[in-house]
Amino acid sequence: MAHPTDRQPAVPAWLAEAVLYQVYPQSFADSNGDGIGDLPGLTARLDHLADLGVTALWLSPCFASEFGDAGYDVADYLTIAPRYGSNADLAALVGAAAERGLRVLLDLVPGHTSHRHAWFRHSARTPGDDRYIWSDRITAPVHEWIPNLGPRGGFYRANFYPIQPALNFGYARPHPDEPWRSPVDAPGPRANRAALREIMAHWFELGVAGFRVDMAASLVKDDPEHLETGRLWGELRGWLEREYPDRVLIAEWGDPARSVPAGLHADFFLHFNGRALRSLWDNGTGSQGSWADGRPCFFDPAGDGSPAEFLAAWEQAEKAIDGRGLVALPTANHDFSRLACGPRTREQLGCAFAFVLSWPSLPVIYYGDEIGMRYVPGLPDKEGSQFGSEARQGSRTPMQWDDTPGAGFSTAAPAAYYLPLDPAADRPSVAAQQADPDSLLHQVRRLVRLRRQVPALGTGAPVTVLSAGYPLAYLRGTTHLVVVNPRREPAELTLPQLTATAEPLLARGVRAAAGRVRAEGFGYGIFAL
């Protein structure tokens, strides 16, 4: 696990050993027949997660909201959205998960609220209230300033959509012509920091194990080096260590080299910040945004990519983190295309999971990826899912539990579903793959089980790359060899240090013996040396 330093304690052991699973609650399991997934539905499906072997689940936003941005517009941080159930349902979920050895993390949106939040309604009619960022005139960038319809008048700064007024955590740099730039220690920013502690404590007392923190880098404005933002999270980490030392904060920052030393326990490689994640998964299909560059990715049947950019980003992050936390590596997420997308089909995904579950990062499985659910193109916008050119709805379709017309997701009429089911005749399901011992689901179960059984495959053992091409080969510690070949064509490799026959612990299409490795197309192997 991560090692303590003078600056920051180690992460809790459970996080260092975790396999995380992301649940998009509105698309996971509907218990009451309204076409929208909910907490009782998720609770009823926990055995699937326990059988998969994951150790913690993260729920995308489930607090009260008008759902203009799928719950990222929070109207009440202390109340579960009625469409998902109640606070009692959340407590029941946490309890049932604990009985199965699972922890539950929620999604915290600290940078903005809904325009319907009581804090904003008060601020919009109260001159001098600085919980939000207010100006008496529009300034650049114009699209961020929204006219206030309340008695206060003026304009408020919004983060994304106009319905998401930015909470005021201060500005790192003042400007004489912009009096709304509060210092970070002004009353409003101090009140908002205190509110974050109150929100976290409320859910920690109900047994929640931590939070994924939305847009964690964006709180303090005009903070080019993120120094004040880092101090904010360092302060919150200090509070956690004093009051809730076994709870965790996982950042959506996308720069682990900066965020983890600042105080977050872990941070994701993300598609919109650098090439690390995209160089692995982004094949130019599915949801494509301004960040897309058309360059080939490594996990692609054509074999035109390279792991070099990922490996360079990993090395930089590991050096900066220096044992103080973890890099989270997701298979996908609600904002990015699924693994099964475009030319990459589910038959190719075993080697992707072999990589994610044997690299010394925190593995995060996006719901449905374990059965190879595909990105579904051409769907309508739903609750802000179409963000410019990014068609994120294709990664948010209902979970496919069985082969009935409703896929076991809901008993509602299809027209009432949160999003349409994948219409493909060969769409995968949990039930069908459960019955097939050679299915992707069983492969993922075996890989998760092996990671949890073999400490050398987890976050604590070093990694040494032996071949940064096709195939990718690396040692975990000195005891285990991993080989993945994500292209269609076979690949061979000479490894002089492989002097004896390696014992395959899990292998599909890979042979390693007497200094030679041969990997068939889409093959992977994990070997004991």
Image (cartoon, helix red, strand yellow):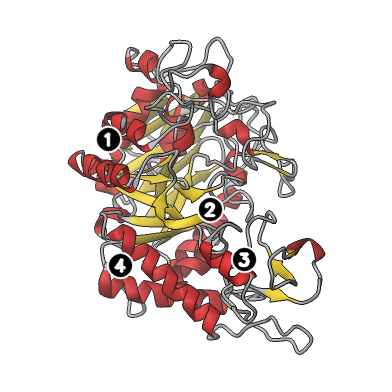
For residue 69, side relative to residue 75 (left or right):
right
Q: Residue type at mark 2: give it.
A: Phe
Question: Mark 1 touching mark 4, by CB under 8 A?
Answer: no
Quarter residue 496 falls in: top left
Q: Is residue 70 above or below residue 343?
A: below
- Check the picture and name the quadrant holding the C terminus: top left
* Marks 4 and 3, the one that precedes in the sequence: 4
In the image as oriented, which residue stretches furthest toward the left?
99
Q: State the mark number for residue 390.
A: none
| Residue at the spot of label 1 | 449
In the image as oriented, which residue stretches furthest toward the front?
151
* Marks 1 and 4, the one that precedes in the sequence: 4
Q: Residue type at mark 4: give it.
A: Ala
Q: Nearer the viewer, residue 337 or 146?
A: 146
Task: Please tell me whether mark 1 sits on a helix, a strand or a loop.
Answer: helix
* Marks 1 and 3, the one that precedes in the sequence: 3
Q: Is residue 135 above or below residue 145?
A: below
Q: Nearer the viewer, residue 270 or 417?
A: 417
- Percent across and percent down for residue 468 are 54, 45
* Marks 2 and 1, the one that precedes in the sequence: 2
Alpha carbon distance from label 1 to label 3: 43 Å
- Does any portion of residue 348 appear in the rendered image? yes
Alpha carbon distance from label 2 to label 3: 24 Å
Q: Nearer the viewer, residue 83 or 408?
A: 83
| Residue at the spot of label 2 | 269
Residues packed near mark 3 inside 10 Å, few (<14), some (14 to 19) or many (20 plus):
many
Residues packed near mark 4 inside 10 Å, few (<14), some (14 to 19) or many (20 plus):
some
Q: State the mark number for residue 166.
A: 3
Residue at image point 75% right, 41% down: 389
Q: Residue type at mark 1: give it.
A: Arg
Residue at image point 36% right, 79% down: 7
